[in-house]
Amino acid sequence: MKVKLPSILFFIFFLLPFVQPAAATPITWKIEGHVYVVDEPLTSNFSVGDTMTAFFTFDTETPDVEPWASYRGKYENAASVVATIGSYTASADQIYMTVLNDFPNDGRDELLVSSIDESNAIGADVGSYHFRGFNMSLKDNYGTMFSSIDLPETPPLPNVFDSESLHLLFGTPYIPNVTLGASVSMNDLNLSVVSTEPVPEPSTILLLSCGLVGLAWYGRKRKKA
């Protein structure tokens, strides 16, 4: 049986209103802070008091790899970051995030963020030290920062967390299989949401594209007739 293109087009466009466009939900936070500690090997590039601006993007639909832990959500390869201090810019991806809510030992809430793979950290060398990655911790000792272990869409305000730390990590080979580390540390962190745009899934894009291409082809055929 020969199926005519107009019938296919009708079928596609009839279904489009009923297709729910599944979408990932990336969130981008802007993080601003000031350098308060610089390890000596990095003082040629960084100084206490320098301003840092970072853009931290993560997908709120990243699955929890340890769903059995009721007080902890652990999310691998969830995020990426681009951080700038003065003229120095570094980035990292494949970052994992951990959300602690009412941790059993002390009742605290905490957001832990850290690079997973050094090979996905990009930044210029500082002397013999290579950029290795990024980590951040926001801790609320009273357990009021989070109400669940889900990835938070809205960042906690500075008056909520009791301690904070954000580090750019560097390292240089010391002896075989041993790396000597150094870091630049930031505090006075202020976090805000700058983007929450949904990204259509490939299946949704494909369906729309097929429909539009088919419609254009049908229109050209009618003009020739």
Image (tube, grey):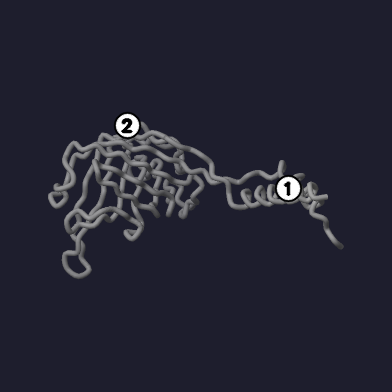
Picture quarter containing residue 99?
top left
Residue carrying label 1? 215
Tell which residue pokes out farthest to the right in this image. Answer: 1
Relative to 1, 99 lies left or right: left
Q: Is residue 7 left or right of residue 84?
A: right
* Three-letter code for the amino acid on which mark 2 is drawn: Pro
At a point 63% along the width and 49% down the height, the residue shown is 204
Tell me: 48 left or right of 25: left
Say which element carries label 2.
Answer: loop
Residue 39 image position (x, y, % from top left): 15, 49
Please tell me which residue lies in front, 104 or 20. 20
Quarter of the image with the N terminus in it: bottom right
Q: From what the image shows, is residue 33 above or below residue 170?
A: above
Nearer the observer: mark 2 or 1; the answer is: 1
> Which label's residue is closer to the chain start, 2 or 1?
2
Q: Position of residue 70 (x, y in %)?
A: 46, 47
Q: How many marks?
A: 2
Q: Residue at x 35, y 52 (%)?
A: 92
Q: Which residue is mark 2?
A: 158
Residue 108, placed above or below residue 90: above
Considering the numbered disc 1 on the image, is that residue within a helix, a strand or a loop? helix
Residue depicted at x 21% and y 39%: 35
Q: Residue 201 at x, y = what percent?
A: 58, 49
Please rate how many residues cluster around mark 1, counting C-alpha atoms within 10 Å: few if below 14, some from 14 to 19, many from 20: some
- Disc 1 marks a residue whose amino acid type is Leu
**What residue occupies the far front of the structure in this picture?**
224
Mark 2 surroundings: few (<14), some (14-19) or many (≥20) residues within 10 A? some
